[in-house]
Image (cartoon, helix red, strand yellow):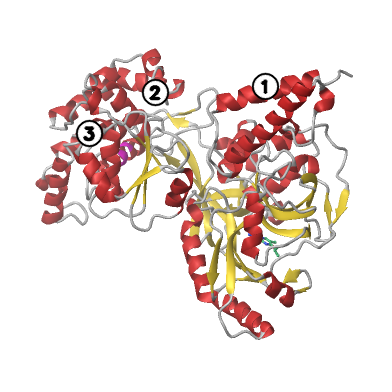
Amino acid sequence: MALIPETTFQEYSNLVAELSQHNHHYYVLDNPSVPDSEYDRQMRKLQGIEELYPNIITQDSPTQRVGGVALQSFSQIKHVLPMLSLDNAFSDIELQDFERKVKDRLNHTSEIDYVCEPKLDGAAVSILYRDGILVYGATRGDGSVGEDITANVRTIKSVPLKLQGDNIPDILEVRGEIYLPKAGFEALNEAARAVGGKTFVNPRNAAAGSLRQLDSKVTAGRALEMCAYSVGQYQAKSKPTTHQGMLQALCGWGFKLNEYVETVTGVDACADYYKRLANRRNKLPYDIDGIVYKVNELALQERLGFVAKAPRWAIARKFPAQEEMTQLLGVEFQVGRTGAITPVARLEPVFVGGVTVSNATLHNRDEIERLGVRIGDVVIIRRAGDVIPQIAKVVLDKRPLNAEIIIFPERCPVCQSSVQRNDGEAVARCSGGLFCGAQIKEAIKHFASRKAMDIDGLGDKLVELMVDESIIFSVADLYELNDSRLVGLERMAQKSASNLVAAIDVSKQTTLAKFLYALGIREVGEATAQTLANNFGAIEIIAQSSVEELLEIDDIGPVVARHIVNFFRNPDNLSIIEALRNAGVKWVDIDLTNQSSQPLKGQTWVLTGGMQVMSRAEAKDALQALGAKVASSVSAKTNQVVAGPGAGSKLTKAEKLGVAVMDEAEFITFLSTQS
Ligand code: 5U1
């Protein structure tokens, strides 16, 4: 075995320490400390040393996170201290009941401090550290005995392999939740769908499934995260006296905590916290299924003790369920703006995720086959956040004898043109183009929508009526409408007709980005339209650009480039654009020769909180016109945050990351200096 020179050993130790710090900044603090290129350079150096001297490798080396040899089975680990579960409260009254019992038992009349924590929807784990080094990780199992998932836990970047900081306990057992953020869950299922594989019903199952992989390389490929929320075994010279103090200590030793943990006084403040988090729930990048309240004083926790397997000092206040069972009553095939035919499930109405759901998307033919769903089946519906409700699973045990196979149509249900499916595409499309009434209607609805031409008063029903009554055939016909043509249509009196004509007239003055978006070019959303406008300046230039020229622009990929070129090659589309311009639709082209017209090019801004003088949309338009990208979340790459009243976690994160923040008044002054 090669002898390791002292200098190499030093260099190796430094690299392990530095890379562990970079990991901590990136995965725990969400605040990268070095560019990716520097991280990769140091990692390659470390790998080089380890290749040359394999016996130098330490357990806390970042190279040891990639997964190793697959296991035959998991061995068991007995929890020295049981992993408790939580009692649930489903209403404010049940929460008050919990608080009353706490006070009665403690003989307390004064208010009690509680730590409020989002209840992450993942898999509970227990991770043991001896002298600061990770020894093992175990699942909860039945609370007394779990499975040894050490190899899998080690692959999760937010789990420290070696603790950092001071006063590290001799023995520390950290309890927490391993979870898969929504984006990781969607990506995992998308990849499974692409190969016709098995998808996971929800992020919780995906996290648990990922942890139970015998091959830790599979786990290493999943974007799992871990948040710490309590401790089990703890041997140290001293111990914090509160739960909050314990969480702070865990944070100092390198663990990730949930960003919304808060300590409040009294049960009313707990109920208020619940409301605030319930409003945020859909926007969070991970699933939570409730709030956990814990008595803050550890001495009080000890006095309260526990019953059966749940502590008396904590309770979980649950949010409305996001999954429910119901029956599939039928399937309708809808035709979208681009002719895409989407099967829509008609369901026995069911209350899920806080609303009554009677429709769910079935995506496409492959999805119907993958789910193996039939009309009449009992299905599990999932409605997580603002996402369209989905059928997550068929409950085969409950399949009725007369369940009917779903037949995908060969002809468009609206115009009877043939249905076609391009190679490599999951979506089947009506080939009728602008002969298809459904596509015309959807194109006009999109054109009139708020982020496009923003025609006030032109709702979906009215568009459908005008197309059905042969009053309009294309978006250009909107600008030929007059009062007399409209009066007499269902619920259209003289005043509404004049208002609509006036709104159509107002919409003529627009921006290049909005006009491009309104045209409904496939794959060209709001952001791409803005990118096209900022980079080309005028529609004539975009129309004449080749795929290669379009590909030179960041954020424009080959698929969208091809759609743009195809759109402007179609003479029907060109004549509609000409008709719109002849009707008076206009905008100011962007002068690309004048560098100062795009002073914010390359910058990313975030708007958060309320705005009093400008609307959010106006602020966004103004920033995009100056060349800035307007993002919805704050990261280390954000250049500037504009924060109004009520700004919450984005403002906190900006402050944590040291991102510049201005208020609305400063923003307006800033804009006035840019023109
Ligand atoms: N946030 C949080 N989730 N959670 C789950 N805290 C928390 N505490 C738990 C559980 C099961 O148990 C405590 C009793 C440690």
Which residue type does callout 2 highlight?
Answer: His
Looking at marks 1 and 2 on the same chain, the residue that comes earlier in the sequence is marked by 1
- Label of residue 563 in the image: 2
Q: Left or right: where does residue 411 sit relative to residue 97?
A: left
Among the 4 quarters of the image, the one containing residue 99: bottom right
Please tell me which residue lies in front, 417 or 289: 289
In magenta, the rendered stretch is: 443-447
Query: Quick one: label 1, few (<14), some, or many (20+) residues within 10 Å?
Result: few
Secondary structure of the residue carrying tag 1 is helix
Question: Neighbour class for label 2 at 10 Å: few (<14), some, many (≥20)?
Answer: some
What percent of the width, then of the height, locates residue 664?
28, 50
Which comes before the other along the chain, label 2 or label 3? 3
- Numbered mark located on residue 44 in the image: 1
In terms of image quarters, where does ligand 1 lie?
Answer: bottom right
Give amino acid for label 3.
Thr
Q: What SS does tag 2 mark?
A: helix
Q: Residue at x 22, y 50 (%)?
A: 457
Answer whether residue 470 is visible to the viewer in this image: no
